[in-house]
Amino acid sequence: MTDHHKRVAILISGGGSNMVTLAQSMQGDHPARPVLVLSNNPQAKGLERAAAMGIPTAAVDHRPFKGDRAAFEAALLQPLLEARPDVLCLAGFMRILTGGFIERFHGRMLNIHPSLLPKYPGLNTHQRALDAGDAQAGCSVHEVIADLDAGPILGQATVPVLPDDSADTLAARVLEQEHRLYPAVLRRFASGDRRLLTL
Ligand code: GRF
């Protein structure tokens, strides 16, 4: 880690497979380095995986705040301010952030979403693609704005939907592409390149 490396904080809620691929990619001539893995779930498996990779971790449990988003976000901000990230990557972070929090990191917060946005913002994306009879599905990396899953798209990867697909089998095929797309987009974004990348 040197001064010229961009500092990246990764926010997770669960297993953290995207976090692992992002962190593993930030080596050698990559313009960025991970400085924090932060979770709203203290039991998130991804925190253990990050610690095993030697990345500082922190957890701010949202449950004690009982829906008080402003208070939760004020607490979430503490480890972030200490880590001084240049870029925030939401990677399976399942809390919806307020416009005020997002504005604070305007233009430097990314998210991975398991659909070909603008199709299927929100949850259950794979089942919705199956129910619609789509021939293709995929994932998107986008900049985060106040509107959920609606920011400028920086990258997309497409997969075929197979006749005997279930939501789970489709999710597994899309996740493989997430693990290729997010690191590729982050490398470009960290060097100031915001052109759309399609895989
Ligand atoms: C990924 O499919 C991501 O697109 C979605 O949540 C899942 C997180 O998986 N938002 P992981 O925790 O990165 O394994």
Image (spheres, helix red, strand yellow):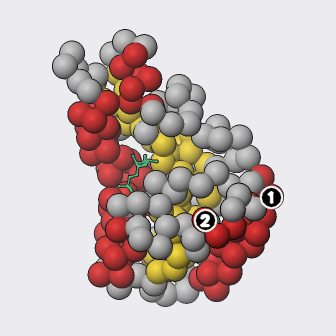
Answer whether residue 79 is visible to the viewer in this image.
yes
Q: Residue lying at the far left in this picture: please name it.
A: 164
- Helix, strand or loop status at disc 2: helix
Residue 14: percent from left, percent from top: 41, 60
Residue 144: image location, x then y, percent? 64, 50
For this rendering, which residue is in front, 125 or 2?
125
Q: Is residue 9 above or below residue 106?
A: below
Q: Residues within 10 Å of mark 2 (few under 14, many from 20)?
A: few
Q: Nearer the viewer, residue 31 or 83?
A: 83
| Mark 1, other Cα within 10 Å: few <14 / some 14–19 / many ≥20 | few
Q: Is mark 2 within 8 Å of ligand 1?
A: no
Residue at 27% in and 45% down: 176
Q: Is residue 33 shown left or right of residue 160?
A: right
The three-letter code of the residue at mark 1 reads Gly
Quickly name the residue at label 1.
100
- Where the N terminus falls, by quadrant? bottom left
Residue at the disc numbered 2: 63
Element class at badge 1: helix
Quarter occupied by residue 46: bottom left
Q: Amino acid at mark 2?
A: Arg
State the image coordinates of residue 188 (x, y, percent, origin top left).
48, 56
Q: Residue at x 37, y 62 (%)?
A: 16
> Is residue 94 rendered to the left or right of residue 98?
left
Q: Position of residue 71 (x, y in %)?
A: 76, 69
Which residue occupies 64% across, 60% down? 108
Q: Quadrant of the image for the C terminus?
A: top left
